[in-house]
Structure formats: C-alpha cells, structure tokens
C-alpha cells in the first residue's frame, strides 16, 4: 500500500499499488500534457516569431526582386522602345508613302478616267455630229466635209508639229486619176522624209448601193505609185459597223504595199506614227549612206590601187620586153664582139707571123741576089765605122 497526501487539504490516504500506479500515470500524463502543451505553445510562439521573421525577410527579398524585376522590365521596355523606334518610324513612313501613293494612284486613276470619259464624250459628240451632218448633206457634200475635217485637223497643228510639211489637195490629173490629198515632209537640207497619198471616203446612210473600203484600194495604190508617194492612207467612214475598221489603224499591206485604213479620229496619229518611223529610218539611211560612202572611198582606193597595179604591171611588161630586146641586142653584140675578137685573134696570129717574118728579115737576105744593093749596104756599113 502506498500513502498519498492531498496537496490542497493535507489529508493522507492510502492507495494500493494498482491505484497508485493509475494515479501516478494520470499525474504523469497530465504533467506531460501540460509540458507538451507548454512546449507546443512555446514552439508555436517560436515558430510564429520565426515565421514572421522569415516572412518579413521573404517580403523584403520579394520587394527587392520586384524592384529588380521592375528595373529589368523598365530596361527591357526601354530597349524594346529603342529597337522599335526606327522600325515604327519606317512603318509609319511606309504607311504614309502607301497612303500617299494610294491617294496619288486614286487621283491619277480618277484623272485618267475623267480624261478618258472626256475624250470618249468628245469622240461620241464628234461621231454624233458627223452622223447628224451625214443625214443632212448630199453624197458630194459628205465627202467634201470629211476632206475639210482632215484639212482643219492638220492646219490646227501644222506650225507646231509639221512646220516643214506640205499637205494639199492632189490637183494633178495628168496621169488620168488623182487622190484627194498629198502629205510630204522634207528636212532642212531638202531631203524628203516621208510622203503619203490620202484618199477620203464617205457616203450617206440612205445610199442604196453601199461601198466597201477595199473597193478603193486598187485605185489608191495606183495614185500612190504615180505620184511617187511612199505610203497610202484611206480615211474612211464606210462600213460603219465593222469591228475591224472601228478598232483603230488597220494595216492592209497584205493586199497593197504600205497601205492603211483609218477612221477620221486617227488622221493625225497615223501621220505622226509614219513620220516618226520615217525619221528613225532616215537616221539609219544616213548611217547607211555614210557606210556606203566609206565603202565607195575604199572601193575607189582599191580601184586606184588596182589601176596602179595594172599600170605598174604594164610598165613592167614593157620593161620586160625592152629588157629582153636589150638582152637580145647584147647577145647580138656579144656575138659581133666574139667575131671581132676572133678576127682580132686571127689578126694577132697573122701579125705574129708577120713579126716572125720581120725578125727573119736581114740585109743579107734582102741583098741576096742583088749585088747592087748589097754594095750599097756595105758602103753604109763602112761609113758608120
């Protein structure tokens, strides 16, 4: 048995071992729990303090990181802004250029459309006027009016575009026929640049027998050749519904050389086109003439050289003949000299014989058989001694 004293009242009482052990375990459990609770509370307080310190430290680090991140973002934004500045400037410039070009293109398109519409309206008005005039005029007057239209169109720009050109009616009927108008232009030196025979054809819509453009090709070609013109142009309002002739300038040189069919509105353009082509051709012609002149100079030089060669060959031939004649004469002279030489040699031989005979000549031989002469020579010898 064990005794236990109450700490509050001081009473002592006994308990058996099992109860004592149970009370002891309870006391120990309570103390343990109190100690554990105290420690837990202390640990919690310590943990809270550490947590607050760690939190404060983390918050400070976070603030520092935020500051660094903000600084980095600011620096990045500045770098991006700096890098984007020229790109954005170029983009804005391109956008402005595109906008300007778009506006310019739109204005140009609007202007072209307006000009085209205006020109189209003028042509429509002109065609309508011609139709109205055709309805009112006789066939002869219709033709004359078309000619007058071409004459007026040319005169309006004559001094500005064709100051050296001639455009007049063809009044020369000596060959049996004549065209309507002849266009000729020369350069300042008087060289012809281009010439065109024009024929104007029209008829009233109420005319019973309708003509075709090709009905006049043969006669126009004949007039062109007789008047020595380079080109032939038929200005025609015939076959008004023809898509071929209404399309523009029609080249019919597959039938007749250098011939074209046009509507009146292409009268000035056809002259301009053919004239510009002729000017370019003149340039090449001049170059060709220069080359030909150079060829002529070379040919003349070659001819002169060939003539000199022929003359020299003839002279050499004559000299050769004379040389042969001289050689023949020399040979003949040689033969004569040889004969003379032989004669001289024979003469020398005879002279040697004569000299030998002279050497053998003596007074004794001369006076032999001539006592008188011998007596004379003997007397001369005595006188000498």
Image (cartoon, rainbow, N blue to C red):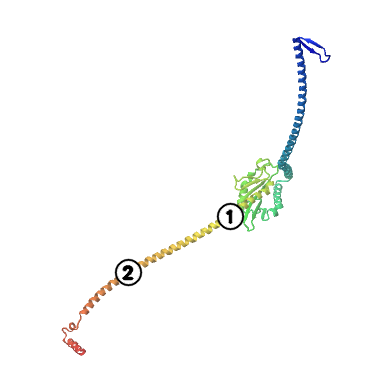
Of labels 2 and 1, earlier in sequence is 1
Kindly indicate the quadrant of the structure image that contains residue 251: top right
SS class of the residue under badge 1? helix
Residue at 53% from the left image edge and 59% from the top image edge: 297
Q: Nearer the viewer, residue 87 or 241?
A: 87
Q: Residues within 10 Å of mark 2 (few under 14, many from 20)?
A: some
Tell me, yes or no, if residue 345 can be seen here: yes
Q: Which residue is mark 2?
A: 334
User: Which quadrant of the view contains residue 100?
Assistant: top right
| Secondary element at tag 2 | helix
Looking at the picture, how far across and down is residue 58, in whole percent?
A: 74, 31
Residue 287 numbered tag:
1
Q: Residue furthest right?
A: 9
Give the residue furthest to the bottom: 383
Q: In the image, what residue occupies the spot 32% across and 69% down?
A: 334
- Left or right: residue 353 versus residue 182 is left
């Amino acid at each position: 048995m064990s005794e236990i004293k109450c700490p509050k009242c001081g009473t002592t009482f006994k308990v058996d071992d099992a109860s004592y052990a149970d009370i002891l375990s309870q006391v120990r459990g309570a103390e343990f729990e109190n100690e554990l609770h105290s420690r837990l509370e202390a640990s919690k307080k310590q943990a809270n303090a550490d947590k607050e310190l760690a939190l404060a430290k983390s918050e400070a680090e976070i603030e520092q990181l935020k500051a660094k991140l903000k600084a980095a973002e600011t620096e990045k934004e500045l770098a991006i802004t700096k890098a984007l500045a020229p790109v954005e400037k170029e983009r804005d410039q391109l956008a402005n250029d595109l906008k300007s070009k778009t506006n310019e293109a739109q204005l140009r398109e609007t202007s072209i459309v307006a000009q085209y519409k205006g020109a189209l309206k003028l042509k429509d008005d002109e065609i309508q006027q011609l139709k109205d005039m055709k309805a009112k005029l006789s066939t002869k007057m219709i033709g004359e009016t078309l000619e007058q239209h071409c004459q007026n169109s040319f005169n309006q720009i004559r001094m500005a575009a064709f100051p050296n050109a001639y455009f007049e009616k063809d009044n020369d009927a000596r060959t049996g026929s004549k065209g309507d108008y002849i266009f000729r232009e020369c350069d300042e030196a008087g060289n012809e640049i281009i010439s065109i025979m024009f024929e104007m054809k029209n008829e009233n819509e109420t005319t019973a027998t309708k003509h075709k453009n090709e009905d006049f090709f043969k006669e126009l070609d004949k007039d062109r050749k007789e008047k020595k013109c380079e080109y032939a142009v038929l200005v025609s309002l015939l076959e008004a519904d023809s898509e071929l002739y209404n399309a523009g300038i029609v080249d019919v040189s597959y039938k007749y050389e250098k011939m074209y069919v046009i509507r009146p509105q292409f009268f000035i353009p056809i002259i301009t086109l053919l004239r510009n082509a002729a000017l370019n051709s003149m340039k090449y012609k001049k170059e060709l003439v220069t080359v030909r002149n150079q060829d002529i100079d070379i040919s003349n030089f070659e001819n002169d050289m060939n003539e000199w060669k022929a003359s020299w060959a003839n002279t050499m031939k004559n000299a050769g003949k004379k040389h042969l004649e001289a050689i023949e004469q020399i040979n003949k002279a040689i033969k004569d000299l040889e004969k003379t030489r032989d004669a001289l040699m024979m003469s020398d031989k005879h002279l040697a014989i004569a000299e030998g005979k002279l050497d053998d000549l003596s007074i004794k031989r001369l006076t032999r058989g001539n006592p008188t002469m011998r007596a004379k020579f003997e007397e001369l010898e005595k006188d000498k001694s």
